[in-house]
Image (spheres, helix red, strand yellow):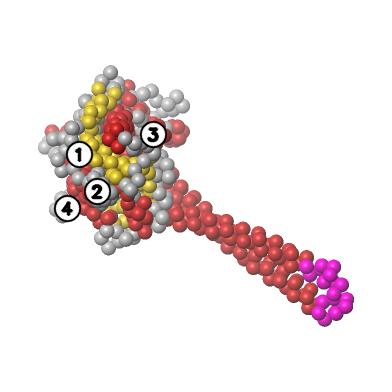
Amino acid sequence: MRWELGGRAPDPVGLLVRGGPGGTAVGVESLERAAVDLARVAREGAQLAWRAGAAAVDVDVVAGALLSRATGVAAMAGLSDVGIGLTAELAALLELAGAVRAAGAAYRAGEAAVARAVEDLQDRVMAVGGLLAPELLVGCLALHSLGVDVPGLVDRVAFDHPQVADLAGGAEGLVLGLQADPLTAPLLRPPPPHRDDDDLDAFDDAFDDLDYEDAVAVLADSAARWGLLDDRGRARVTPEPAPRPGALALGSLRDLVADQGNVGDGEDYAGHVRVIEVAQPSGSVWIVEVSGTQEWDPRAGDNPFDLTTDLRSMAQQSTVLADGVQQALAQAQAAARVGHGSSAGVAAPVLLVGHSLGGIAAAGLASSPRFTARHRVTHVVTVGAPVARMPVPPGIEVLSLEHTRDPVPRLDGRPNPDRASWVTVTRDAYEDGDSRASTVHDLGGYVETAALVDDSSDASVAAWRSSSAAFFEGDRHGEAVIRDYAIRRVRP
């Protein structure tokens, strides 16, 4: 159900790369620039043709023809032929420029039309789901009472039909459907004032007035009225005396993704972020690791790596976790300045990385003017995270790793941008005999994917790898300093 018009064929190890310098969008932009250049050359040629035609009737040329008729006529004819020849060539050049420009415009128009059609379908399907929510809930409870493993069934369906997860991009339709049902409407915000019946055709204007982020915020805020998904509070950030055993300097993308398993252990090391200072010949670069969801209880507790932060981050709201990450990086850079007796960390490049919730948080921080005003974010790595709607500035280099059958990166219902600074690598990764979508989301599979990306010769991947090389130099220019911070949500 994703509307991806661009992309290359999978490489021999099954990696499908989209975006980056080798992406379709960059090719279209190159076509458009070529059209502009062709038109400019045509204009310059037109000036030459005009000068040639004017020279043919120049006073001196005409006067020369009176003195030597044969020579003068030949000169005038030659200049006229030049002008006529240039005019014909220029007409062809202008026609080519117009065709190239039209091809680029047609691609963009086609992509936009497909996107609108898919999003409209998502909204309408989810609107039906919202209208039938009570019936669906009763049906699920009835199946459960009969011994049917409903969550397991959904897990297997998502594995076999991963496009189903894209329907979550129709959050607007879900909200409008819930608001249209008299049983669920009291649980949500009041419906839009222009809607006066529950006919799906009457939702058209409402779809236009409500975007995805607003719809997710409505769901979270409505739950907060009942004591759920409430992110109120502040972040308390405490440095650990030493990093967790097993933390290592990073030498590759595989190391970076694998390290998420160390800092993101929700059972034995819950609620931590890791900040790594990587020494350079002059100054340092910084890596900030944000782990995935550790608490699935909709009642927010002291660990901000939870379902509440998931939804609030998808709504692009500020969160306790995001504030805690900002504090952790600030504390680490302050400690570095004390240790080095210098301005360590000031305007130093920062790479943000995260798996699942951590990827959402990383992309959200990179999209935050408040955060980027304080920290020079140059790179982001997201792993199995729905981040396509995050407004990450084009000047930040993004690498997104996704698995085809992983439903989580599909939850925003939209493919990642295809642009020079955003590379998405997709792989159909799963264990033989295991037909559950949830296991495809596990970090272990993404570690394997990261190792394949390390060895990839794809032009877009190679360009990203080159631009991020400084972050993966480990102890080459001095021992990397690893600092772990515990983040807790403190209620007001």
Crowding around mark 4 (Cα neighbors within 10 Å: few <14, some 14 to 19, many 20+) is few
Give how far apart the Cα atoms at labels 2 and 4 are.
Answer: 35 Å
- Report the front residue among 396 and 196: 396
Q: Earlier in the sequence, mark 3 or mark 4?
A: 3
Residue located at (28% from left, 41% from top): 277
Asked whether disc 4 touches disc 1, contact meaning CB atoms under 8 Å apart, the reply is: no
Q: Earlier in the sequence, mark 2 or mark 4?
A: 4
Residue wearing tag 4: 431
Crowding around mark 2 (Cα neighbors within 10 Å: few <14, some 14 to 19, many 20+) is some
Residue 380 found in image quarter: top left
Left or right position of 400 against 432: right
Secondary structure under tag 4 reads: loop
Q: Amino acid at mark 4?
A: Glu
Give how far apart the Cα atoms at labels 3 and 4 are.
Answer: 43 Å
Residue wearing tag 3: 374
Give how far apart the Cα atoms at labels 2 and 1 are.
Answer: 20 Å
Image coordinates for residue 309, horizontal then vertical, percent: 28, 31
Residue wearing tag 2: 475
Question: Quick check: is 404 in the magenta stretch?
Answer: no
Q: Quadrant of the C terminus?
A: top left
Q: Can residue 405 be seen in the rendering of this structure?
A: no
Q: Amino acid at mark 2?
A: Asp
Residue located at (25% from left, 22% from top): 490
Image coordinates for residue 2, horizontal then vertical, percent: 35, 48
Crowding around mark 1 (Cα neighbors within 10 Å: few <14, some 14 to 19, many 20+) is many
Which one is closest to the eye, mark 2 or mark 4?
Answer: 2
Which one is closest to the eye, mark 4 or mark 1?
Answer: 1
Image coordinates for residue 411, horizontal then vertical, percent: 31, 41
Up the image or down, 471 lies above or below 123; here it is: below
